[in-house]
Amino acid sequence: MNMIPQERQTRENGGKPEENGIRVLDSRDLFQGSRELCIEHGEFLYRLRITRQGKLILNK
């Protein structure tokens, strides 16, 4: 992830870096070693997975 030094410092200090007011999460924290997770949004369930090429795919 490309971060400017101030964002990197905030992350290293345990803070939650923001970019233009948007919270930034590291995918490693979300996936915790797995390659797939489900996101419940309202009445729908979405599947987020990491491809072999390291890209993210979101399916409904």
Image: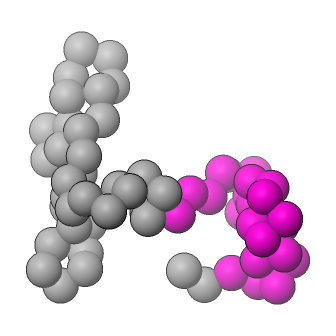
Say above or below: 5 vs 11. below
Per the image, is 1 magenta? Answer: no
Nearer the observer, 20 or 49? 49
Nearer the observer, 34 or 37? 34
- The x, y position of residue 22, in whole percent, is 67, 52
In the image, is 20 to the left or to the right of 38? Answer: right
- The x, y position of residue 54, in whole percent, is 25, 80
In the image, is 8 to the left or to the right of 45? Answer: right
In the image, is 36 to the left or to the right of 25? Answer: left
- The x, y position of residue 57, in whole percent, is 20, 61
Report the residue at 82% width, 85% height from top.
Answer: 5
Which residues are drawn in magenta?
3-26
Q: Is residue 7 visible?
A: no
Say above or below: 18 vs 47. below
Report the residue at 75% width, 66% height from top.
Answer: 11
Image colouring: one colour
In the image, is 21 to the left or to the right of 39? Answer: right
Per the image, is 9 magenta? Answer: yes
